Image (cartoon, rainbow, N blue to C red):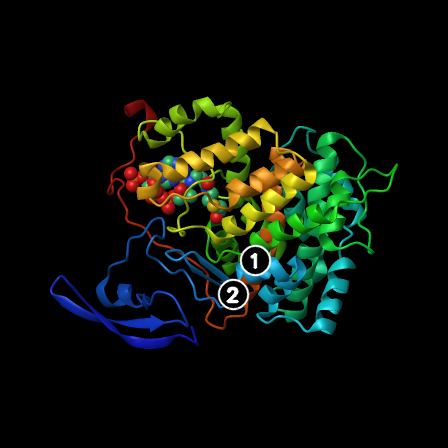
Amino acid sequence: MSDAKTAGTATLTVDGQTVELPILEGTEGPKVIDVRKLYSQTGMFTYDPSYTSTASCDSALTYIDGEVGILRHGGYTIEQLAGESSFLEVCYLLLHRELPDAATLQDFEHTITYHSMIHEQMRNLYSGFRRDAHPMAVMIGVVGAMSAFYHDSTDINDPQQRLIASHRLIAKMPTIAAWAYKYSVGQPFLYPRNDLSYSENFLRMTFGVPAEEYVPSPAIVDAMDKIFILHADHEQNASTSTVRLAGSSGANPFACIAAGIATLWGPAHGGANQAVLEMLDQIGHKDNIPEFLERAKDKDDPFRLMGFGHRVYKNYDPRAGVLKKSADAVLEELGVDDDPLLELAMELEKIALEDPYFVDRKLFPNVDFYSGIILKAIGFPTSMFTVLFALARTAGWIAQWKEMIEDPDQRIGRPRQLYLGSTERNYVSPDKR
Ligand code: CMC
């Protein structure tokens, strides 16, 4: 909290008692009312179950203005980063809050490259899973198990160990993720190669086989790297908040990232890109779009238009803008302009963008709508979509975890509640109830 300026006070009158609450101001974005002393002053908590109006921490990594459609890391717009930077450079930016100079970037790339192998005994973990296990289940297990293999980077109080853990997580995720895929299709695991870039390496470990050389097209490598950049961090979303909360107890970083992966899995968060493709399958044909749009509007029907809407972006998702262009390039490169599912996606986008229900509620296609389309075109099975999100978001998770641990004011996170259960009553034995 050291860098937040005080910008006045808010006055709250409750039960005839008046308290002054400091208003704090960051460098940009809404001011916050500091309620940390509210309980000691009034005996009351604030109530905000889905954190709609609550800033859970302060952070210097990522700035979002959802009304305007802005996403910036360290002050750099996501459009510039996706257009001119690389995923590893963005990882460095998130970890160190400054862009590296050329020599530092080279060193960082070297460090990540030389941490990309995983402990050979970790291979055995995969064979413990069913072949048809969801790869996210495998990711939670294998990443959590890193705590059991890298003891020399689990002391959260040692800055060097924290940095090594961060490097290990970013470096090993492509290997762990690609092996989750290889295991599901029954193909041999490929080891990383140090002459390839981060994204090339991941594509080769996923789609290559030992029998022949695998050379991905530059357009696909570029799209992959962009998808990683666009998913790298997104301030205090559900999975990042989970990583912070897990980390606030002093848990080791590998365990915290496994908790983040679990949270990301849900269809309202990272699982949405898989849900988009499943929804397109369900709609089946563009003639059925009106029927499904009506279902999406019906509050009694659980069907929602997956890949539309966002908790924070109420204008447009800037990541979606970047990926829409990338989707066009990838589809052209792969010559899949006549895929009926992709055609259906484009038609759905057009119709929903003109429908008053979606226009009035500012429900625009989000990043998952386009990433789902690109990933399908590249050849990833839908079950791998969320895994790719987890791979990229590891950069943000670990950077946010590190920022939290390095904050001298950091304490365990402990929300309170509004209790609605029974008041005290006497225990009655089962035979007398
Ligand atoms: N289809 C139909 N109606 C919707 C949708 C949708 N996808 N999203 C929101 N609405 C309606 C919602 O019913 C509500 O209507 P009303 O005002 O009449 O009650 C209104 O729009 C406002 O939505 P909300 O539910 O208050 O918004 P939220 O912030 O609670 O939910 C969301 C955000 C992303 C969970 C939701 O939009 C959704 O479920 N979208 C589909 C899933 C999806 O694509 N998720 C990926 C998010 S981007 C990736 C990430 O950051 O993880």
The disc placed on residue 86 is none
Nearer to us in this view, 289 or 167 = 289
Q: List the residue tagged with mark 2.
A: 61
Amino acid type at image mark 2: Leu
For the point 71% across and 32% down, which residue is it?
Answer: 184
Residue at left offset 38%, top offset 61%: 55
Q: Which quarter of the figure has residue 130?
A: top right
Residue sitting nearer the eye, 307 or 22: 307
Q: Secondary structure at mark 2?
A: loop
On screen, residue 41 above or below 281: below
Question: Marks 1/2: CA distance?
Answer: 9 Å
Report x, y in % for residue 156. Answer: 61, 64
Looking at the rendered structure, the number of numbered marks drawn on it comes to 2
Three-letter code for the amino acid on which mark 1 is drawn: Gly
Where is residue 109? Give x, y as percent: 73, 63
Label 2 near label 1: C-beta < 8 Å?
yes
**Looking at the image, which residue sits at the far right?**
211
